Image: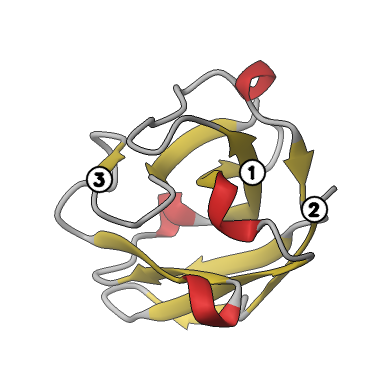
């Protein structure tokens, strides 16, 4: 079992940057691909991006491509989401989630593919 805790949320101005972290407990962290999702106010939770177990493969939603970067450090049981050029529409609660996958596997954009979730961290971007 994996427990996930997000951190690093807060308030930023449009054009600014924030870095979110997702820290996992347990010894099997490197067996899980990690996805990031977000839920804007009054909207459905949406996919942001995902990274494979080793970190060698990753992909992003079109809305964040070129602005957000996911990385991971398996020695520290941590996955980071670097968010640059923030926009007011990036305002949301951000969640990380873990999916048990094959070595080179990447989970999809569907929430049902993920086995464990963090409780979320609020990101607010002002214009």
- Residue 11 figure quarter: bottom right
Write down the residue under mark 2: 2
User: Disc 3 designates what residue?
Assistant: 57
Q: Nearer the viewer, residue 91 or 3?
A: 3
Residue 66 position in % (x across, y down): 14, 55
Which one is nearer the viewer's eye here, 100 or 93?
100
Give residue 8's quadrant in the image.
bottom right
Left/right of residue 62 with respect to residue 117 in the rendered view? left
Specify which label sits upstream in the sequence, 2 or 1.
Answer: 2
Q: Are marks 2 and 3 in contact (CB under 8 Å)?
A: no
Residue at horizontal 75%, vertical 57%? 120
Q: Residues within 10 Å of mark 3 (few under 14, many from 20)?
A: some
Chain-order first, disc 2 or disc 3: 2
Q: Are marks 2 and 1 in contact (CB under 8 Å)?
A: yes
Q: CA distance from mark 2 to mark 3?
A: 21 Å
Q: Left or right: where does residue 75 sit relative to residue 104?
A: right
Which residue is drawn at the image coordinates 29% and 40% (left, top)? 60
Tell me the distance, in whole angstroms, between the alpha carbons under discs 2 and 1: 8 Å
Residue 127, can we see it? no
Q: Position of residue 9 (x, y in %)?
A: 62, 75
The residue depicted at 73 percent of the width and 65 percent of the height is 27
The residue singled out by tag 1 in the image is 98
Give the left or right position of residue 114, taking residue 81 as reference: right
For disc 2, the neighbor class at 10 Å (few under 14, some 14 to 19, many from 20) is some
Is residue 103 shown above or below 68? above
Image coords of residue 5 (percent x, y): 76, 67
Dot 1 alpha-carbon crowd within 10 angstroms: few under 14, some 14 to 19, many 20 or more: many
Residue 51 position (above or below residue 59) = below
The earlier-in-sequence mark between 1 and 3 is 3
């Amino acid at each position: 079992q994996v427990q996930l805790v997000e951190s690093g949320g807060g308030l930023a101005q449009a054009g600014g940057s924030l870095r979110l972290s997702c820290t996992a407990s347990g010894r099997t962290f490197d067996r899980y691909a990690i996805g990031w999702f977000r839920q804007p106010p009054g909207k459905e939770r949406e996919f942001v991006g995902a990274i494979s177990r080793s970190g060698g493969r990753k992909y992003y939603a079109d809305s964040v491509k070129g602005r957000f970067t996911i990385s991971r450090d398996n020695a520290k049981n941590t996955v980071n989401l670097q968010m640059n050029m923030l926009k007011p529409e990036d305002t949301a609660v951000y969640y990380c989630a873990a999916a048990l996958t094959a070595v080179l596997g990447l989970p999809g954009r569907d929430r049902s593919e993920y086995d464990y979730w963090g409780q979320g961290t609020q990101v607010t971007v002002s214009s």
